Amino acid sequence: MIWREKRVLLIVLGVLLLANTAFFFTYRVQYESRLQDLAARQEQAKAQLDQAHSARIAAEQQLAAYKKVQNDLQVLYNDRWSTPAQRLTALIDEVKRLAAASHLQPPSYQFGTGETKSSGNVNTRGSIGTQTVSITYSVEGTYEQVRRLINLLELSDQFVIIDSIGLGTNGTAADKALSLNIRLKTLFRDARPTVPLANRQL
């Protein structure tokens, strides 16, 4: 018989077939395991990428908010406060205009000045000097006129603060005349340049 004559060869072929089959199934199991591991790593990397993307968006939003606050502070400091030379005349004109619009024109105005610092230590880095200007005057009128004046001052485009108000009555109860003592104040940016900390005298 042929198979008896080539028995050794057939046995060798059978052994190789069994070895190849075992190797194939073993490799397939390992390959599937590697695929699952790669898929898990891919999902993890995708999750990390999404997290990094979200963190980047949040950081960009925080940066935009910071720049907006910084820009608003610059506008407040340079435009809304400004220096007395740039804004004092406009402020006085605004106070007089609002008094005239309320039909409460005072006979005179009193002005006062003062200087403040953002910190008690003048050597503090970034200390901003400001000058306070107050405007005090007295008027007489009806309740409606007084209320209108206060409302116009609160809505003014000028940076003006109602510091104090004193109300009293004049005349009889029939005319309902009120006397108003009002003190306004505003802040001006110090016109002197800010001296760096290294150049300040200790």
Image: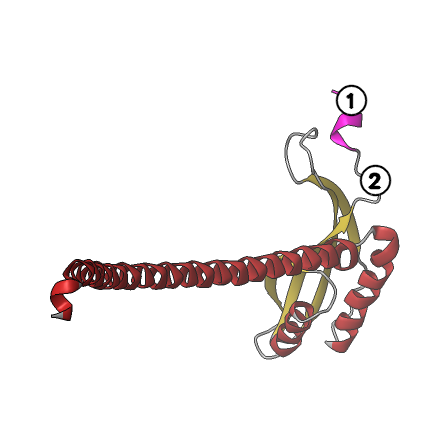
The answer to whether 192 appears left or right of 116 in the picture is right
Look at the picture and state if 185 lies above or below 141: above
Q: Secondary structure at mark 2?
A: loop
Residue 193 circle label: 2
Near-viewer residue (37 or 154): 37
Near-viewer residue (28 or 148): 28
N-term mark: 1 or 2: 2
Q: Residue at x 65, y 68 (%)?
A: 154
What's the coloring here? secondary structure
Quarter of the figure with residue 17: bottom left
Near-viewer residue (93 or 170): 93
Q: Is residue 155 magenta?
A: no
Please name the residue that numbered disc 1 is placed on.
201
Which region is colored magenta?
196-202
Q: Secondary structure at mark 1?
A: loop
Q: Is residue 200 magenta?
A: yes
- Amino acid carrying label 2: it is Pro
Quadrant of the image containing the C terminus: top right
Q: Residue at x 68, y 68 (%)?
A: 153
- Count residues near mark 2 (Cα–Cα under 10 Å), then give few for <14, some for 14-19, many for 20+: few
Query: CB atoms at circles 1 and 2 under 8 Å apart?
Result: no
The answer to whether 64 appears left or right of 20 in the picture is right
Q: Which percent across, then down, holds residue 183?
A: 68, 56
The answer to whether 80 appears left or right of 179 in the picture is right
Q: Which percent across, then down, holds residue 44?
A: 37, 59
- Count residues near mark 1 (Cα–Cα under 10 Å), then give few for <14, some for 14-19, many for 20+: few
Look at the picture and state if 101 lies above or below 54: below
Residue 136 visible in rendering: no
